[in-house]
Amino acid sequence: MIRSVLVANRGEIARRVFRTCRELGIATVAVHSDADAGAPHVREADTAVRLPGDAPADTYLRGDLIVRAALAAGADAVHPGYGFLSENAAFAAAVAEAGLSWIGPPPAAIEAMASKTRAKELMAAAGVPLLAPVDPAAATKAELPLLVKAAAGGGGRGMRLVTELADLEGELRAAEAEAAAAFGDGEVFVEPYVVGGRHVEVQILADAHGTVWTLGTRDCSLQRRHQKVIEEAPAPALPDELRDTLHRAAARAARAIDYRGAGTVEFLVTTDGRAYFLEMNTRLQVEHTVTEEIYRLDLVALQVRVAEGRPLEARPPAPSGHAVEARLYAEDPAAGWQPQTGTLHRLALPDGVRLDSGVTDGDTIGVHYDPMLAKVIAWAPSRDEAVRKLAGALERARIHGPATNRELLVRSLRHPEFTDAGALDTGFYDRNLAALTRPGGDAAAVFALAAALADAHGRSRFSGFRNVPSGPQVKTYAHAGTDHEIRYRLTRDGLLAEDFPGVRLLSHAPDEVVLEVDGLRRQFAVSRHGDRVHVDAPHGSYAFTALPRFPDPTARTEPGSLLAPMPGTVVRIAPGLAEGDRVEAGQPLLWLEAMKMEHKITAPAAGTLTALPVHTGRQVEVGALLAVVAEPAATPAD
């Protein structure tokens, strides 16, 4: 019997495992970096052990330190969570060698699937259908588009889409460098990229007594940068015959490597209904929650059961209903998915949905780890009901702090391509991102008016009232690249707001404004944190930056300056690049790493690189000068 579990992870998954451990009466041990010293998973554990440093390579990827921590804390088992060392066979073996129970598959099974290239060989021998690999040296135009993938790891790292043969060599080198930095293994391979394909996976669970459960399918087709954004179970619009084929293939994959514990077999499903093996994840998946919801199971509790050597029931329970999960990220989808940092002042969801979060009110979102704040999961008897429930909960959520992808999630869930389940595929955001991130327009302006009126009450309830003509009050708020200038008067006859002829003020306070908009009563909750103003209503939420009436004239940068869009580390500079070089528009200059993703910084126009004040390994803050590209002066006409 396992009595104390160390979770070799952080954030949401550590809290998730701890929750089950508490329900089972198992003591909990956390490990933490210095950056995570005050994190929720540390506060909630019975015991915590410091891993000195901030970077993952010095902390959560140090298997030797984690095993030592488990022994020092008196733990008798280790749960790896997902990411970090969760699919590291050497770490699993080291845990077992230390006399601890490993809550995961045997090291041999992890090793068998650790390399995607070797995994494909094993699956071919087991009769699982595969995409044929492509020799990059012999690739032809007819085989385009191609996908370069890291043999180790996942999460979209070391992955490149190639649409032109001339780009293949450069993308191979870039993928190799990113894979080596992320996983310590630079091996990559090339396979066909299937346009219009769906990402469908099967959850498996196996014990040491020969029982293998296949717990239905999940669709994870909505992805950004090859990372999942919205997942659901069961995968919709799959013919029964195809669903049975996927279940059988997943079971064969598990038996082929004598699997134990929870795992996921991932497939690419083409538009003509063919399925191909992609990879097997030898761990719990981020999206395991939707399977738990429809089967009413606790997969972490079942992982513990299997690790203790106890058998599963002969068959799993029957599934019921539909579940959808949305990943809430601190990022700006309209700005190239740039991760965001800062203080999370509030995160609150309405009742009726499940919230699995790694952060709580007041926590700081830093640069060292993945920008996912939380997973929001809705279950209902049907898909339509579950999707509606999740979209409504996200719309009503109070999320105050860094910019998030919340609005993108709501719009995605309500997009006709998503609501028509048969139209799902991995190209959803390639086609629809511009429309999904378009600013709110008139709706945002009404929210900005509410912010201004709350601010007016905060200064003085009657300060704006006038009996004689006077100039209007003026406030300016920025949102999604658009400035909303609000001009209004508060008179004894009511609100006079320019550009809002159909709006009447019913009441206002520093934290709440009630307006009548075209005959409809609207209530707005207003919250301020520095120059950020959050306005929430049942029909949406907006976060504004309050702009000063007279901007600082010194807040300017030299033309052509490239500023860091986020805090991060300069991981690469283009080979041979130096000040004085001629560069072309769109030419990559350097790469920043922040929150487990690399971000390419390119020349905004053709010109001369007149400044390059950074070097590889340098950490920069948001707004730091990275480079200056001076455009050539215009030549006077003769």
Image (cartoon, rainbow, N blue to C red):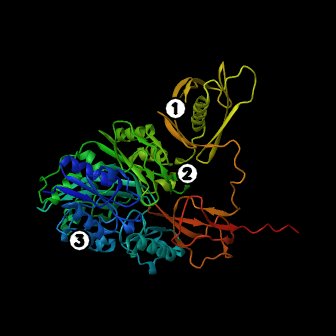
Earlier in the chain: of badge 1 and badge 3, it is 3
Query: Reading the chain from its start, which is encountered first: label 2 or label 3?
Result: 3
Mark 1 is surrounded, within 10 Å at the Cα level, by few (under 14), some (14 to 19) or many (20 or more) other residues, namely: some
Residue 434: numbered disc: 2
* x and y, in percent, of residue 70 in the image: 24, 63
Distance in Å between CA atoms under marks 1 and 3? 55 Å
Quadrant in which the C terminus appears? bottom right
Tag 1 residue: 511
Task: Please indicate whether residue 310 sits to the left or right of residue 103 in the image.
Answer: left
* Left or right: 605 as drawn, with respect to 198: right
x%, y% of residue 438?
Answer: 56, 46
Q: Residue 446's x, y, as percent?
A: 59, 34
Residue 145 visible here: no
* Residue 413 coordinates in the image, percent (x, y): 43, 44
CB atoms of marks 1 and 3 within 8 Å: no
Q: Which of marks 2 and 3 is in front?
A: 3
Question: Left or right of 619: which side holds 197?
Answer: left
Q: What residue is pinned by disc 3? A: 94
Element under label 1? loop
